[in-house]
Amino acid sequence: MRRPLALTLALLVGATLPAWVLAQEATPAPTASPAPAPNAAPQATPAQPETTQTTDGAPPAGNEAENASLELVRRGDDGQERRIRIVRTGTSDETGIFTICSRQDDEPEDAPSLAVFSETGPGGVLITIDKNVIRVPLALVTQQQGENGEGGDGHVEASAGTARFLENVPEGKTDRLSRCAVEAIPKPAPDTVLVTQGKTELKGEKLVYDESDGIARIDGPISFTRPSDDGLLTGSSQSIEVDVDAEQTVLVGNVVLNSKGGRVSKAARVEYDDQANTARLIGTPDQPAESTQGGDVLRAQELLYDLDRNEVVARAADGGTITGEFQDGEQGDSSSGTPETTTPPTAPPETPPDQPTPDPNPDPSGS
């Protein structure tokens, strides 16, 4: 038999909240569950969510009041709490499901719970991590309950795919979801994990987050676009890493940025911040970051790219170099990020020509 996750009851009796908080802006009226078919296995049913009060006391607007949501709380080494929020935007049983399949009776006491979010409607399932809002059709959330009933931030896998309730437990199946009469079928595919950060939109194939390091990794190939006053910035990378503790988004592996003005910038890693309008291109000793526009090429261990102005500033680490190749064929090389300056030699003061000594007794006749 499964055991429902009694989060609502914990709130009512004033117990300590677990780190995994199930939330819904308003509790819909309960509906009667259909009687199970003969010999049917106990099915996982949507967990009853508790009501969450908004900060200003105002009720949520529109359909948001009915959307099932879940918050995972990560406690960093700095003592700060950072939240990962997962929301199913749809409410129809025809477009998706939300359920929590908890520990079975014959499983260990510390067996994790498994939550399933699926939504094939246009809003999908939204996962908010740091500055990024990630839209996917399917998300599976595993959380291990710790001491005092508190859980960690768990493990999240998200991609394209579908989920549905089953009439019976499939014969011969022993996995948790099958025992809860739930079927989830991930189908990772390119451009199905949609990431929005400010004006930037990125597309990937699969997201995996784990509490062991607090990093959400999105497999690629990654493609992205960002509009600006000067035109569209496009690019690609092999993957994306979102570091929850550092609150940082990094494009990883053969990163290429292309601006409408013809600038092409490349690096092994790029720390990307849409809000600050910057991309910090980080190279390696063997493969420095590089930015090319026309015939001009700038290379350094680190380049700071102003996304709005389409300008690049070079920086060199201690002992590093900045090199440039220019259209006229000249090359420059310096040992620091500050260009060397040359002061022209100061010319000595001019020496006035020798003047004849006046005759103290001039000839009155002028001869």
Image (spheres, rainbow, N blue to C red):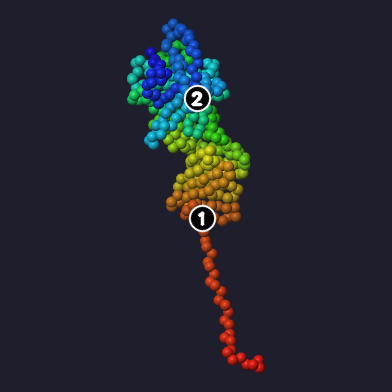
Occupied quadrant, residue 80: top left
Q: Please state the horizontal and vertical placement of residue 202, each as a whole percent of the image.
A: 54, 33
Q: Please state the horizontal and vertical placement of residue 173, each as a whole percent of the image.
A: 41, 16
The residue positioned 48% from the left and 37% from the top of the image is: 249
Q: Which residue is mark 2?
A: 57
Q: Are discs 1 and 2 less than 8 Å apart at CB?
A: no
Question: Residue 13 or 158: which is nearer the viewer?
Answer: 13
Question: Residue 55 or 116: which is nearer the viewer?
Answer: 55
Q: Quadrant of the N terminus?
A: top left
Check disc 2 and give the amino acid type: Gly
Q: Quadrant of the C terminus?
A: bottom right
The residue positioned 36% from the left and 23% from the top of the image is: 149
In this rendering, the answer to whether 282 lies above or below 245 is below
Q: Which residue is mark 1?
A: 339
Is label 2 in a helix, a strand or a loop? Answer: loop
For residue 158, say whether it is visible: no
Q: Nearer the viewer, mark 1 or mark 2?
A: 2
Q: Please state the horizontal and vertical placement of residue 282, each as a whole percent of the image.
A: 48, 44
Report the number of numbered marks: 2
- Compare marks 1 and 2 and give the one earlier in the sequence: 2
